[in-house]
Image: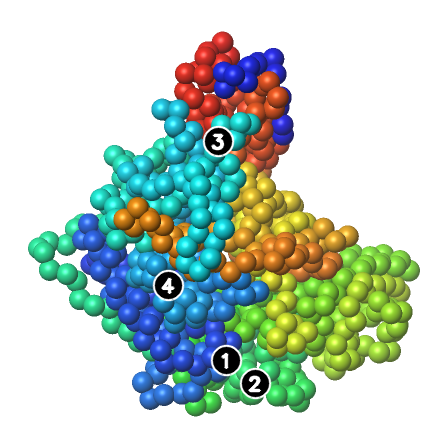
Amino acid sequence: MVLSLNVILFLALHVLTTVKSSILNLTNNGYDGIVIAINPSVPEDEKLIQNIKKMVTEASTHLFHATKRRVYFRNVSILIPMTWKSKSEYLMPKQESYEQADVIVANPYLKYGDDPYTLQYGQCGDKGQYIHFTPNFLLTNNLPIYGSRGRVFVHEWAHLRWGVFDEYNVDRPFYISRRNTIEATRCSTHITGINVVFKECQGGSCLTRPCRRDSQTGLYEAKCTFIPEKSQSTRESIMFMQSLDSVTEFCTAKTHNTEAPNLQNKMCNYRSTWDVIMDSDDFQNASPMPGTNLPPHPTFSLLKSKQRVVCLVLDKSGSMDSDDRLLRMNQAAELYLIQIIEKESLVGMVTFDSSAEIQNNLTKITDDNAYQNIIAKLPQFAGGGTSICNGLKAGFQAIVYSNQSTSGSEIILLTDGEDNQISSCFEEAKASGAIIHTIALGPSAAKELETLSNMTGGLRFSANKDINGLIDAFSRISSRSGSITQQAIQLESKAFNISRRKWVNGTVPVDSTIGNDTFFVVTWTIQKPEILLQDPKGKKYRTSDFKEDKLNIRSARLQIPGIAETGTWTYSLLNNANSQMLTVTMTTRARSPTTLPVIATAHMSQNTAHYPSPMIVYARVSQGFLPVLGVNVTAIIENEDGHQVILELWDNGAGADTVKNDGIYSRYFTDYHGNGRYSLKVFAQARKSTARLSSRQQNKALYIPGYVENGKIILNPPRPEIKDNTAEAEVEDFSRLTSGGSFTVTGAPMPGNQNHVFPPGKITDLQAKFKEDHIQLSWTAPGNVLDKGKALPQASCGKELMHQLASHVSEPSWRRILQPHSNL
């Protein structure tokens, strides 16, 4: 929204803008369970492990001092990929995985630099997703550029663990202070330096000149750079420039620069980083350690990822006979075994009612015969009571009987029944070291089910009246090893309630990053429909080309030979029976081991919500580590009664969205319809060449071009140039679908009894710019209910307006302008 205030603000120019699961915990001032995982694509290098240990050991001491003797790193696990050679000192992981790691070590996608950063897109104080270091950063000397690795780790840890933000701003490196002086965006203002424009550079030196003021903005010209003095006396702040030797602390309320136009001020309502840190859960019970001694050095465990082991534990109790639940479970399990589970994995199966039976011990998935042997034993009849603990114990036995350890193995537990004895095996489940994924089918599934997932680091799902809910849940449970090119990708998942002699049509784009191991599946409830599938070159696949299962699971499957053609695929289904439910699912994998596909992931801001607390839907669309922009992203949230809420997610930097154009699409969710479980599913589509890749990364350690030492500028090595075509490159049309798991709501009123308890959204991106002889204000309009609907700006922009004007215009001037218009 843009508002020209040439009447209201007339001014002459001469007077004058997860929940991610983690095993990390803090006990008696020490962090335990930190996981640093190395990506499978990183070449084996012993020096990498040694440098990780040195970095964390140094960081522990810095962290201890920075938090005033409150916290340090005590126990750290380094997860070695399967691609490295085995060694006797490598131990077996339990719940540690690459997907859930706190720190990942991986090559950058499109080699444009080694800036450390934290994937962080929550609100102020929310934990981040992970820290990303590149092998090159850990193996080469970056001391002049970023400071020591230990200092960098503390900077990133504050992003990850305490949800604070950077105190610099690359886009707005300068602002006008209340004293009407131009200042570098920094914290604290006691950090000194010079402002110069680099002219000709040769070797390690450059010709420079002083910065000039821009007559339009009143700020320095665009090429002006702040170069800090190498020798400083101030201790703050780690979130601005951790590389300075004197900087050892976070900005406090006393030293915080509230005028600086940085993300910390924007996201945290102008609070200091130390204030936010002290309000975190970590510091509620972490008093400073007494005495003067330093804490012990961290202890490191080296863990090596193992072959994937999965056991299906499936409910066949009497309640599974209703609503086609047994049929739907078998359809989803069959799809998982044929299309989702990675080759060479070990898979077993257990079925249970009041007792449990091992149907298959672990079988290596190498060819069609392997998974057909498991599919043949899917339950055909439902009956009996429900004992989840018996099912779990049989699942553990199936793993152990096959000479595998339960530690690090995965259980996929699906049930629709209540079981008041489930808590009796919680301790055994936790001690097993297994990762338990839970799928609650229907509204009566045991309420304690999610506890199993939470305590073991597993995923949690629910499926109700959404006929494809089970398939979507199974499709999400892929390898946690970090090998994205091996993971199955869901392209289509639709259900159609279609009457007799009616056609249904659809299209699915297949882009050039995918196409290997592509399947098209149709399911039905009464009678097989006529199927017509056509590839982009016109080749047609008909009903006779589809392979039908032999167990009356009512599904037909076509595996596309070779690599699926790039372009738009079309399908048509003709229902020859009475009205019935048809579903269409399409999955694929990366085109090749060296081609990183576009992927979408989704989750809610938390696993549980108590009304009237709002929740946030997050979806990330990326290729490698680069965000994909301009995508149409839609979330479908369904409660236990089948009521659906459809939300368009935005990447506009307003409302729930932290940063514009970072590939994170967000939206507040406030439309609660009763208590219980809710499921999340997200569609991401790019059509008509609207999507593009961006190489920009937020929340990273600041690159320092150089320092002033003894009055002379000493330059650091230049940052690698980013070519224009990689800074923002077009992306082909694509379609992705992903499940975001389930979450639980309590305290919500019955539908229809909700009051308007949520406030209007806050304006967070107000900007003031000169336009000829007046000031133009622009902002993204908030919603009347957080980011939903429309709201007038008066209620939400007052404080932000003052700060924005103060950073563009001298204080006496803007106070005179606003005096007659205080209602703004």
Name the residue beneath numbered marker 2: 344
Secondary structure beneath disc 3? loop
Q: Residues within 10 Å of mark 1 (few under 14, many from 20)?
A: some
Q: Are marks 4 and 1 in contact (CB under 8 Å)?
A: no
> Residue at image x 30%, y 71%?
53
Q: Earlier in the sequence, mark 3 or mark 1?
A: 3
Name the residue beneath numbered marker 3: 213
The amino acid sitting under disc 1 is: Arg
Q: Which of the two marks, 4 or 1, is nearer to us in this view? A: 4
| 585 vs 219, nearest the viewer | 219
x and y, in percent, of residue 798 in the image:
47, 23
Residue farthest along the right direction in this orientation:
501
Q: Earlier in the sequence, mark 2 or mark 1?
A: 1
For the residues marked 3 and 1, what is the alpha-carbon distance in whole angstroms?
61 Å
The amino acid sitting under disc 3 is: Arg
Tell me the number on the disc at residue 142. Answer: 4
Q: Earlier in the sequence, mark 4 or mark 1?
A: 4
Q: Residues within 10 Å of mark 4 (few under 14, many from 20)?
A: some
For the residues marked 2 and 3, what is the alpha-carbon distance in whole angstroms?
64 Å
Q: Which of the two marks, 3 or 1, is nearer to us in this view? A: 3
Q: Which of the two marks, 2 or 4, is nearer to us in this view? A: 4
Q: Is residue 302 above or below residue 243?
A: below
x and y, in percent, of residue 703 in the image:
42, 54
Q: Are marks 2 and 4 in contact (CB under 8 Å)?
A: no
x and y, in percent, of residue 422 in the image:
41, 66
Secondary structure beneath disc 2? loop
Q: Are marks 3 and 1 in contact (CB under 8 Å)?
A: no
The amino acid sitting under disc 2 is: Glu
Q: Which of the two marks, 2 or 3, is nearer to us in this view? A: 3
Name the residue beneath numbered marker 1: 308
Q: Are marks 2 and 1 in contact (CB under 8 Å)?
A: yes
